[in-house]
Image: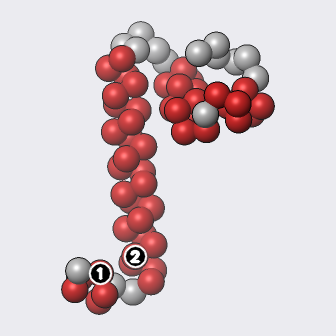
Amino acid sequence: MDLMRKMSPEEKLRRAIEYSAMVRKFGEAGLRQQYPRAGNREIFLRAAHRQLGADLYAKVYGAELQL
């Protein structure tokens, strides 16, 4: 906890962005294991569906990928 207090706001933001990217990549890796034949676009859309939920996903991406 002391390390966090000593970090500048910029460093804290940079770390948060790095951690967020890492979590996203782990999620995509899990999807790639579930759907080994899926291309990059399909993985992106499946990740978006997980993150946005069905209703918002349908509004944003329509029927591009039926899940």
At a point 58% along the width and 30% down the height, the residue shown is 49
According to the picture, the residue beneath numbered tag 2 turns out to be: 12
Distance of label 2 from label 1 (alpha carbons)? 7 Å
Residue lying at 77% horizontally and 31% vertically, measured from the top left: 59
Residue 32 drawn at (x, y percent) = 37, 22
Say which residue label 1 marks.
4
Could you tell me if the residues under marks 2 and 1 are in contact, i.e. CB atoms within 8 Å?
yes
Residue 14, numbered circle? none
Between 18 and 23, the residue placed more toward the observer is 23
| Quarter residue 52 falls in | top right
User: Which residue in the rendered view is the most extreme toward the bottom?
Assistant: 6
Name which residue type carries label 2.
Answer: Lys
Which residue is found at the position 42% from the left and 54% from the top? 20
Q: Secondary structure at mark 2?
A: helix
Where residue 37 sits, quadrant-wise, is top left
Q: Is 63 on the left or on the right of 9, as rendered?
A: right
User: Where is residue 40 drawn, in percent x and y?
Assistant: 50, 24
